[in-house]
Image: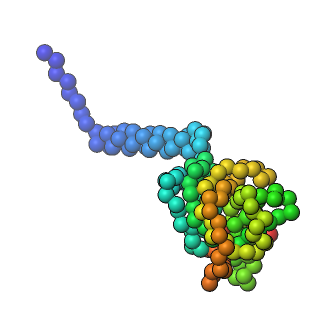
Amino acid sequence: MFIFNVKLNKNAISKILFIIMLIVIVAIFLFGVYVIFVKNDSSFTISDSIKSDDVFEVTESNYANVLKAANDNIDSYIGCKVHIKGYVYRLIDFEENQFVIARNMPISQDMQSLVVGFLCEYDNAMDFKDGAWVDIVGEITKGNFKGDIAMLKIISIKETEEPENPYVSLPDDTYIPTSNMF
């Protein structure tokens, strides 16, 4: 028969438990740093796509958010249909069948604004003069204009009146206006 005489020292036990807890906390912290900075093989993206059989209404308040989301994650939005109003805006290097369904987005308090919108393709695009307000239903496709962009293939188009508020809201908190960068 063996008898062990064990004397427990409360200070020693508390120090050992403290060291074990400290090691666990440091290990969890290091694992988190590894996952975020080293193993991060994909960026954080919003994957809020819309069903392709629905027609999504683009309004003054969500215009810039939809435009930004579609261009940031084009592949998720291909085939989605949108209903959008804006004016015809052309650049000199557009093809004859291209224009932007544009709106103005104020970027400063003195109403300086940017022209924002989807590049559109439509066979009879020249039927609509620059600055004409149009109402469009289109399908988002992947286009190329100085890089990959979300583009609208027009399903239906008609002229309309200029809305009471021709401006659109800025995207949510993630937007950084370029006027403040200089």
Q: Is residue 125 above or below residue 161?
A: above
Say whether residue 174 is left or right of residue 24. Answer: right
Say whether residue 69 is left or right of residue 130. Answer: left
The N terminus is located in which quarter?
A: top left
Residue 54 position, x and y percent, is 49, 57
Whether residue 54 is visible, yes or no, is yes
- Residue furthest top as drawn: 1
Q: Is residue 88 above or below residue 82?
A: below
Q: Tell me what residue is drawn at x 49 percent, y 54 percent.
A: 53
The C terminus is located in which quarter?
A: bottom right
Task: Count numbered badges in the picture.
Answer: 0
Q: Nearer the viewer, residue 106 or 102?
A: 102
Would you identify the image quadrant in which residue 22 lies?
Answer: top left
- Residue furthest right as drawn: 92
Q: Nearer the viewer, residue 36 or 157?
A: 157
Residue 6 position, x and y percent, is 23, 30
Q: Tell me what residue is drawn at x 52 percent, y 60 percent.
A: 55
Would you identify the image quadrant in which residue 39 lies?
Answer: top right
Residue 164 position, x and y percent, is 62, 84
What colour scheme has been applied to the protein in the rendered image?
A: rainbow
Residue 129 position, x and y percent, is 78, 71
Q: Nearer the viewer, residue 42 or 105?
A: 105
Q: Nearer the viewer, residue 67 or 3?
A: 67
Would you identify the image quadrant in which residue 163 lies?
Answer: bottom right
Q: Tell me what residue is drawn at x 65 percent, y 70 percent.
A: 158
Q: Tell me what residue is drawn at x 75 percent, y 69 percent.
A: 128
Whether residue 180 is visible, yes or no, is no
Q: Is residue 150 above or below residue 133?
A: above
Say whether residue 60 is left or right of residue 29. Answer: right
- Residue furthest left as drawn: 1
